[in-house]
Image (tube, helix red, strand yellow):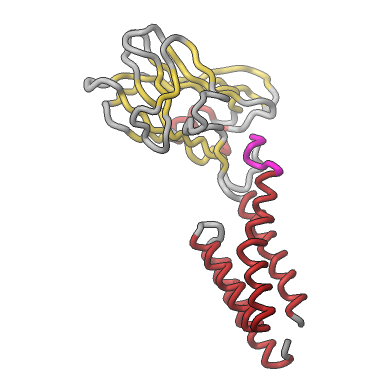
Amino acid sequence: MRIRLILPLFLVFLIVVFNITLVYADVNLLQNAGFETGSLYPWYDGGTGGAVSNINPFEGNYCYRVGYAYAPTAFVAQGWATPYPPVNNVSLFSFWVKAYQSYGSYFKVKFTLYSTPTGGVSSGIETDEIFVDNVWTYFDLTDWLIANGHDKYMYEFSMNKGNNEYLFYIDYFALMQESGVIPTEPETSTIMTRMVLLVVPFIFVLVPALLLAELAGKNGLIVGILLGVIVLFIAGWMPLWILFLVGLGIILLLLHGRGGGE
């Protein structure tokens, strides 16, 4: 088999692997989950005093401030369009919270649910008041959501500040949909994402492999593929088991070369 046939086949293999990785990767159902756009959209808020803030975020450049001082009840929320995502497919629901004052504050988490993916009977689940101190604190409410929302579909999620409670900051939300489930949010499977998955293996594998193959034949091809794959692995674009398969492929290529040349 000649180099010009081996390389396209290998590139097709990488593209298939990357697309499988996208489909079977967990998907965050909350958009702008860390408020890193610098704006609230597509979240929306109610009450008074809420704002995107760049004061001491947990991660990145921004977080969100819910309410202010002893303002009346305030909240921040995000919802979904039909078909509503099922609670049963949630693999993680977590976030970070920090009270503004040293004596802490209280908040509640609420989900509005439907009985079917397109509507049906509406219901709601809400936590008791949860205390948070004035240091960034991690909360994992996955078990609470699954236990109370089993067989339901999520219409809206909100973080609520109790009446006469002091303000708090929130950041870095994760409402992850279980791997292998088709994403319900359009931003997780866009044309741009697919284009990236095509361009990345082209840049890091095809180009160096072709250049080195022209310079050093089969050995150059092998070195180019190996360098490209290592770069993808270090960047986190390729799992270890794929690296192992690539190594086996290179061994087969070497063995083929002994028997037939380029």
**Image position of 212 with respect to 149: above or below:** below
- For the N terminus, which image quadrant? bottom right
Residue 64, x across and y down, in percent: 42, 25
With respect to residue 69, does 187 lie above or below? below
Residue 115 x/y as whole percent: 63, 24
Question: In the image, is 46 to the left or to the right of 214?
Answer: left
The residue closer to the viewer here, 69 or 208, is: 208
Q: Residue 16 at x, y = what percent?
A: 69, 59
Q: Residue at x 29, y 22 (%)?
A: 100
Quarter where residue 95 is shown: top left
Residue, far left: 103
Q: Residue 253 location in percent, x, y?
A: 66, 82
Identify the magenta region. Answer: 185-191
Q: Residue at x 35, y 35 (%)?
A: 138
Q: Inspect this view and state whether residue 68 appears.
A: yes
**What residue is drawn where x is 66% and y is 63%?**
14
Residue 22 included in the magenta stretch of the image? no
Quarter of the image for residue 143 reads: top left
Which quadrant is the C terminus positioned in?
A: bottom right
- At horizontal 59% and vertical 31% (from top left) the residue drawn is 151
